[in-house]
């Protein structure tokens, strides 16, 4: 017996859980990096305050070992930023974030390291100035990372919507296949069928056609909703997804035309049987 599988839009797209977990890990890494930068800055500020006080008191600076440790921590922050940038650059959607994360590593964070190096080998006044400049560089790095976090959230939401788009395309293909199966079943001739069997089959086909029409309406509504929420999909999504979107719209139109033709055919057949 011919059986059509209804298309449910309740299930998460394939890979949605995996994508959510990947995004969570990246968001966490970005947030932890910014927090580490802020903590390093706070400790550098303490060194700056002490060096400033030492200058006023004409006293020697006794925290060179701590300054050296903070410098090493900053080098590790540079490495972590580079690693995170490499992760972003693996995905076309996040490529710009990769470039900007790398810029944070190579500009303010590297500058902070250089200022700490200058402070380590300098006189007390140079230490005071070096710590101050390093703190400012770290503050700039933290601000830029905070902006990157916000933009990552926006792009992550777009990536999830692109996955929804993929699901819509898959649903369209399954619906098109169901329509073809339905068409074949309706066109099938069964000479051995009794009038009662034929009537039962026609009723089943009518029910299946209603399900197909409902599936198509839901699919179209979901696509419209996605594009209303994300109009940038039309001009900012990945090229292959845009091609899929075009195919999706075209296929949906074909399905609607075929459903209308099937509906008319079923009505004609029902009217013909009624006359007999």
Image (cartoon, helix red, strand yellow):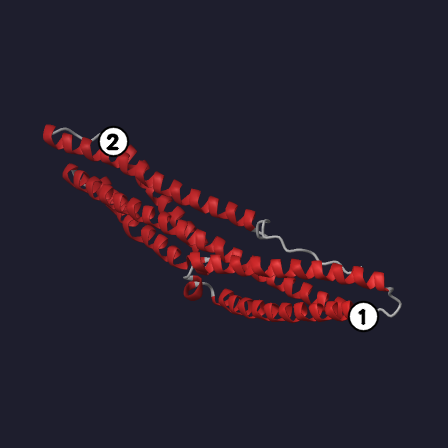
Q: Quadrant of residue 40?
A: top left
Residue placed farthest to the front in the image? 275
Q: Quadrant of residue 63?
A: top left
Placement of the C terminus among the 4 image quadrants: bottom right
Secondary structure state at the residue bearing disc 1: loop
Residue 184 appears anywhere in the view: no
Q: Residue at x 52, y 58 (%)?
A: 221
Q: Position of residue 5 (x, y in %)?
A: 69, 56
Real-space Cα distance between discs 2 and 1? 104 Å
Residue 126 appears anywhere in the view: yes
Q: Residue at x 36, y 48 (%)?
A: 150
Q: Is residue 224 found left or right of 43 in the rendered image?
A: right
Q: Earlier in the sequence, mark 2 or mark 1?
A: 2
Mark 1 = which residue?
Answer: 276
Q: In the picture shown, does residue 47 fall above or below 274?
A: above
Secondary structure state at the residue bearing disc 2: loop
Mark 2 = which residue?
Answer: 63
Q: Position of residue 209 (x, y in %)?
A: 68, 62
> Callout 1: 10 Å neighbours few (<14), some, many (20+)?
few
Q: Is residue 64 found left or right of 151 in the rendered image?
A: left
Q: Position of residue 192 (x, y in %)?
A: 89, 67
> Callout 2: 10 Å neighbours few (<14), some, many (20+)?
few
Q: Position of residue 162 (x, y in %)?
A: 49, 58
Residue 266 disc label: none
From the image, state whether disc 2 or disc 1 is nearer to you.
Answer: 1
Residue placed farthest to the right in the image? 192
Q: Residue 113 versus residue 136: which sits nearer the camera?
A: 136
Q: In the picture shown, does residue 253 fall above or below 224?
A: below
Q: Residue at x 44, y 55 (%)?
A: 158
């Amino acid at each position: 017996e011919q059986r059509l599988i209804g298309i449910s839009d309740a299930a998460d797209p394939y890979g949605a859980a995996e994508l959510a977990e990947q995004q969570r890990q990246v968001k966490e890494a970005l947030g932890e990096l910014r927090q580490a930068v802020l903590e390093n800055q706070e400790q550098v500020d303490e060194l700056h305050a002490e060096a400033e006080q030492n200058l006023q008191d004409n006293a020697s600076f006794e925290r060179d070992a701590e300054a050296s440790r903070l410098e090493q921590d900053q080098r590790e922050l540079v490495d972590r930023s580079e690693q995170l940038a490499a992760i972003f650059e693996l995905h076309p959607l996040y490529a710009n974030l990769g470039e900007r994360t790398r810029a944070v590593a190579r500009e303010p964070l590297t500058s902070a390291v250089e200022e700490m190096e200058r402070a380590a080998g300098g006189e007390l006044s140079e230490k005071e100035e070096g710590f101050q400049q390093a703190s400012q560089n770290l503050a700039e790095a933290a601000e830029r990372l905070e902006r990157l976090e916000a933009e990552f959230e926006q792009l992550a939401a777009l990536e999830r919507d692109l996955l929804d788009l993929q699901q819509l395309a898959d649903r369209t293909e399954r619906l098109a296949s169901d329509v073809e199966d339905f068409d074949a079943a309706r066109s099938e001739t069964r000479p051995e069928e009794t009038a009662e069997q034929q009537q039962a089959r026609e009723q089943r086909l009518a029910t299946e056609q209603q399900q197909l029409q409902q599936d198509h309406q839901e699919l179209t509504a979901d696509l419209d909703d996605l594009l209303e929420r994300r109009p940038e999909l039309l001009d900012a999504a990945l090229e292959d997804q845009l091609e899929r979107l075009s195919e999706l719209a075209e296929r949906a139109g074909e399905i609607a035309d075929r459903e209308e033709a099937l509906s008319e055919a079923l009505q004609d057949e029902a009217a013909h049987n009624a006359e007999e």
